[in-house]
Image: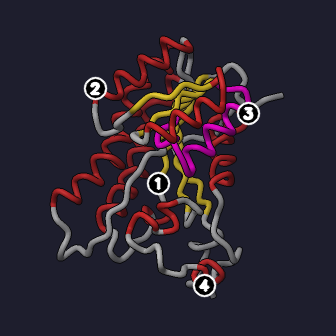
Amino acid sequence: MRKLEGKVALVTGAARGQGEAEARLFVAEGAKVVLGDVLDGPGQAVATELGDGALYRHHDVGSEGSWAGFVAAALDRFGRIDVLVNNAGILHVAPVAEIKLDDYMRVIRVNQVGCLLGMRAVIPHMAQVGGGSIVNVSSTTGMEGAMGLVAYSSSKFAIRGMTKTAALELGRVGIRVNVICPGGIDTPMGRGDEAGFEAVDTSGWYKALPLQRIGQPKEIAKLALFLASDDSSYCTGAEFVADGGQLAGERFA
């Protein structure tokens, strides 16, 4: 039996990486999926490949108006909303002493505010159908600091707090809210390609992890599937770490 049969899911940042893997797995598990991203070419290509069970819409998660249109498109096409995966995120590298306010706020707007707006946009529609599941995506960098990532780390710490608060407020209407904290994942962001680190060999760092490798997007997608499905029916306000053992103890002893 497919785990998301009959459910409608919204996935942000779905044109590639973790979001793409989640969209593909959710459709395979029976869901109708609305994919949102600002990368229209790749996003539309994924949705087209997935067929009638998928719909792509250009979506800027930091915009209230964009969320209104994204939700309206889901309701118009599929009639309901059961699952939201707040996956979209961006990265900016700069030390605290040098970061520009505009760069800091750009990361906060997408990662943190985008998550808040997404939750707020789907609450009435999930409540109307008797509940749902919101899966927010933080990071291990939202559980410990990281040099040069003050904006990203701040946003990811905030997502954990928002998740717990939302879980307390929304449980009574049947909406569960949980957060995934991935470690390094084999995506353009996880590899550092978008932070100017394309030429940096990170293989040694990952080999030093207890599991001795970088994570794969499909592994995070499977965790998102668990949280989106009824398999996690008694889980809310919880943090699920998938980091190859990064946070387990002494630094990769």
Is the residue 136 above or below the residue 44 in the image? below
The residue depicted at 51 percent of the width and 41 percent of the height is 42
Q: Which residue is mark 3?
A: 28
Q: Nearer the viewer, residue 96 or 218?
A: 218
Foreground label between 1 and 4:
4
Is residue 24 within the magenta segment? yes
Q: Is residue 246 left or right of residue 196?
A: right
Give the residue at the far right of this rendering.
Answer: 1
Q: Quick one: SS at disc 2?
A: helix
Residue placed under numbered mark 4 in the picture: 204
Percent position of residue 159, x then y = 40, 50
The amino acid sitting under disc 2 is: Gly
Mark-to-mark CA distance, 4 and 3: 35 Å
Q: Type of residue at label 1? A: Ser
Provide the residue span drawn in magenta. Answer: 11-31
Q: Name the residue tied to disc 2.
A: 65
Q: Earlier in the sequence, mark 2 or mark 1?
A: 2
The relative height of residue 37 versus residue 199 in the rendered view (above or below) is above
Task: Kindly tell me whether residue 238 is visible in this rendering.
Answer: no
Residue 101 visible in rendering:
yes
> Percent x, y for residue 29?
74, 32
Residue sitting at x 41%, y 51%: 89
Q: Position of residue 81 (x, y in %)?
A: 53, 21
Look at the numbered disc 4 and give the secondary structure of its residue.
Answer: helix
- Disc 1 target residue: 138
Calculate the distance from the C-alpha at mark 2 to the C-alpha at mark 1: 24 Å
Q: Position of residue 142 (x, y in %)?
A: 43, 61
Q: For this view, does 195 lie left or right of residue 186?
A: left
Q: Choose the circle earlier in sequence order: 1 or 4.
A: 1
- Name the residue located 62 percent from the left edge and 60 percent from the top edge: 242
- Secondary structure, mark 1, is loop
